[in-house]
Image (tube, coloured by chain):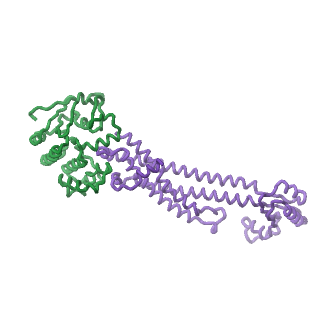
Amino acid sequence: MAYSYGGGALLSSISLTLAPGAFYFLTGPSGAGKTTLLKLCYGDLQPTSGQVRAFGKPIQSLSRTDISYLRRRVGVVHQDCHFLDHLSVAENIALPLIVAGRDVAAESRNLIQLLKWIGLTDRADALPQELSGGERQRAALARAIIQSPDIILADEPTGNIDWEMSQRLMKLLIELNRQGKAVLIATHDLALIRAVKQQVQARVLRISEGRLHLAGADL
Amino acid sequence: MRLVRLLRAILPRDSQSDRIVPPSGFTANLTLFASGAMAFLAVFALTLSFAAGQLASRWGAELAKGATVRIIAPEDQIDAQVQATLRVLETTPGVALARHLSKEEHQALLAPWFGDGIDVSDLPVPELIEVIEADPGIDATGLRLRLAGEAPGATFDDHARWRAPLLKAAARLRGFGWLSILLIGGTMAAIITLAANAALAANAQIISVLRLVGATDGYIANAFVRRFTMRAGVGAAIGTVIGFVAVMLLPGSSESSDLLIGIRVQGWQVLVLFLVPPIAALVAFFATRFSARKVLEGLT
């Protein structure tokens, strides 16, 4: 597929399959189209030519409601992890369950386990603006995975946090990947990629001049 | 039936989803105030409409059955013409009662203009005979012809001349009351639409987060619709209660002039007034629903 913006082709001849259990890094210079590619994956943007197929169905043919249902199977973590500021951390994490009409009280055990897993049990009742950068990233990850999505897309998830916290976050993603989730992480942090590659079989893709290339073994 | 299904889907309180829309902000206060003020005005418009209806009915009922014979004659003939008129009326079909008004009743009629202490016996005022019509009524043309022959100073007045414009005025007043209610409803819908638009625009980031986590546009719209419907209902309830209290504090017929008789609600009219809050909530429901759908379609 391809995607043009403002008269120019931002992405061209992109072909990528995210199979269950796959772990990909997406690298490239700023403005290369990493975020755009992620948005195309979860239906926030539509390709200008070609097709994006999600779970066997072309996204272009999906209604807005169908795209909403698609997003319940795709967990997304943004660098600027937006939260609802008037809700507590626990409520923000449970938001996908709430909008899906699921009974949060009935799933409180899962929520408590998830909070424990990301190390935010003590911060459950805090408001998002009271969290540090790392805590926000972990909360965003928890929100992305609470519905046990098939695919996790993360856009610069470690952009605002220190190295130690980045490692901790990556461990969480690796663990999810080992559970069979497909993971695609857009990042320009090569040190982080190298560290993760030592723990999991990850492929590194580079976007350059609108095309997707498999990065060399040096990564 | 479709409306009932829609309301059922949206209105039951869902404490989880209710919380996704921020609870405060100027749009909340605007909706509360606008619906309260509009409900207050609607109560007055309804009361005015009821009062106009009551006045029209009263005037119609009382005046339709009442008539007057006025006798103007030289002083030495006046008693004879009064007696002649009474005889004519006694034999006229359709007359239930014919009664010559006493000096005291004349004085009472003139009291609003001359005051209570003035003796009107020396004033050249016409003699009056009150006539109450039976059913069927009087043949006014026939009666006038008979009076012209037997009591030339007597004039039969069935009030039709001035009753018709009064009834017309009361009907128009009632119409204005209902028109005011429609305008109030329209204005409230417009204000709530603007408030909902502003709320949705101000919460664009919240909408973006909700979409990201899989919320459908219908879910987001319902959350806003529920919030605005509840706010409008609460505001309208407050406005209605204040309006109702204000109406009940208006001077009643026993305390003031006849003009105010009927500017008071009673019986089924009270129930109609208390339909204002649910109707306001319904207006808010449709206004917000329309607005939310439009805004959400425009937000990418």
Is B208 displayed left or right of B295 in the figure? left
Q: Position of residue B89 (x, y in %)?
A: 84, 62
Residue A149 vertical position relative to residue B67 in the rendered view, above or below = above
Q: Position of residue B153 (x, y in %)?
A: 87, 59
Query: Where does the N terminus of chain A fall, quadrant-wise?
Result: top left
- Which residue is rendered at x = 23% and y = 34% of the image? A33
Residue A15 vertical position relative to residue B136 in the rendered view, above or below = above
Q: How many marks?
A: 0
Chain coloured purple = B
Q: Position of residue B118 (x, y in %)?
A: 76, 70
Is A165 displayed left or right of B103 in the figure? left
Visual hue assigned to chain A = green
- Which residue is rendered at x = 32% and y = 46% of the image? B215
As drawn, which residue projects farthest toward the bottom? Answer: B117
Is B210 displayed left or right of A119 in the figure? right
Question: Is residue B24 or residue A15 the one in the foreground?
Answer: A15
Query: Where does the C terminus of chain A fall, quadrant-wise?
Result: top left
Q: Quadrant of residue B290?
A: top left
Q: Position of residue A95 (x, y in %)?
A: 29, 50
